[in-house]
Amino acid sequence: MKKIKDIDCFLLDMDGTIYLGDKLIEGAREFLKTIAAQGKRSIFITNNSSKNKYSYQEKLKKMKIEVNPEDIFTSGEATTIYLNKHKRGAKIFLLGTPLLEEEFIQAGFELVSEGTPDFVVVGFDTTLTYNKLWKACDYIRERVDYLATHPDYNCPIGSGSYMPDAGAIIKFIEASTGESPLVIGKPNHYIIDSLCEKYQLSIENTAIVGDRLYTDIRLGLNAGITTILLLSGETSPEQYYSSDLSASYVFPSVKELSQLI
């Protein structure tokens, strides 16, 4: 097991790890300062593809955390990196928000709504229409390659409330077509592959820090990197100790973790 002091790069989930809703978790700001003071790196990593890195930069700024947008990595960006390795400049039928559309266009893809695309990509589309779903199903039945940015069924929006997320859209399409996508985001290793390609990282001295067993910790296990579970968000101690997943380290929050960096 890699010692925490030997970790050079921390991949940080955000909601439940750094903040809860719009409230910073105690010790989070000091934790980030400690990482920077020791010359280590922190990269924020999120499955939410409805927003881009600039949206998250603005949210963190409101909590008085200054972060370079290039140190924020979404499943949407990971998907563009994966696709560019397979077919640069491909035609994409995209179920996504205007921010995700912008991400794909900037990465050199052509977004199409007519003709036959090279790929169908499903993201967390809060602008979703029935017509988009219908077209996606038609293309998938025609055997167009099918990907999704991430598999989350619900997105927490605070006070115990949730929005249906990309995973719910995937299930709709599966019910109609019988097909499931290649999923890039957490807990699948593709998001780490894309991240390592962008940042030229070695996974040997990298750790994933998060509050969800089935995304953050499962990702670390799938990608072969050190896992640090924080009990400040979704996972309770009882849930962890009754789970079949085992993290490398478990802490109440980033406050306790920062004392060992």
Image (cartoon, rainbow, N blue to C red):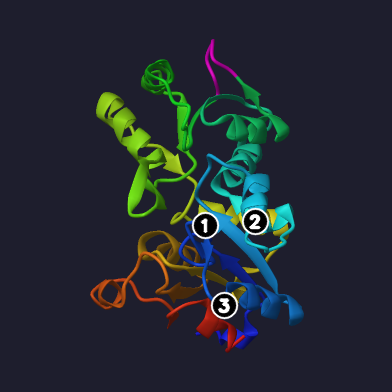
Name which quarter of the figure residue 259 lies in.
Answer: bottom right
Instruction: Tell which tag, 2 or 3, sits nearer the viewer.
Output: 2
Query: Is disc 2 placed on a helix, strand or loop?
Result: helix
Q: Report if the CB atoms under discs 1 and 2 are less than 8 Å apart.
A: yes
Q: Quadrant of the C terminus?
A: bottom right
Q: Amino acid at mark 1?
A: Asp
> What is the number of the mark on residue 22?
1
Question: Is 232 placed left or right of 209 in the picture?
Answer: left
Q: CA distance from mark 3 to mark 1?
A: 15 Å
Name which quarter of the figure residue 11 lies in.
Answer: bottom right
Q: Considering only vertical position in the picture, is 139 above or below 41?
A: above
Q: Amino acid at mark 3?
A: Gly
Which residue occupies the extreme top position in the image? Answer: 115
The tag earlier along the polypeptide, 3 or 1, is 1
Can residue 153 be seen from the camera position used here?
Answer: no
> What is the number of the mark on residue 178?
none
User: Toward the viewer: 127 or 25?
Assistant: 25
Q: CA distance from mark 2 to mark 3?
A: 16 Å
Whole-percent x and y of residue 252? 43, 80
Q: CA distance from mark 1 to mark 2?
A: 9 Å
- Residue receiving disc 2: 62
At label 3, counting other C-alpha atoms closer than 10 Å, the crowd grade (few under 14, some 14-19, many 20 or more) is some
Q: Amino acid at mark 2?
A: Lys
User: Toward the viewer: 212 or 227?
Assistant: 212
Question: Is 223 placed left or right of 197 in the picture?
Answer: left
- Residue receiving disc 3: 27
Stretch of the chain drawn in magenta: 112-118
Q: Considering only vertical position in the picture, is 72 above or below 175?
A: below
Name which quarter of the figure residue 212 lies in.
Answer: bottom left
At label 1, counting other C-alpha atoms closer than 10 Å, the crowd grade (few under 14, some 14-19, many 20 or more) is few
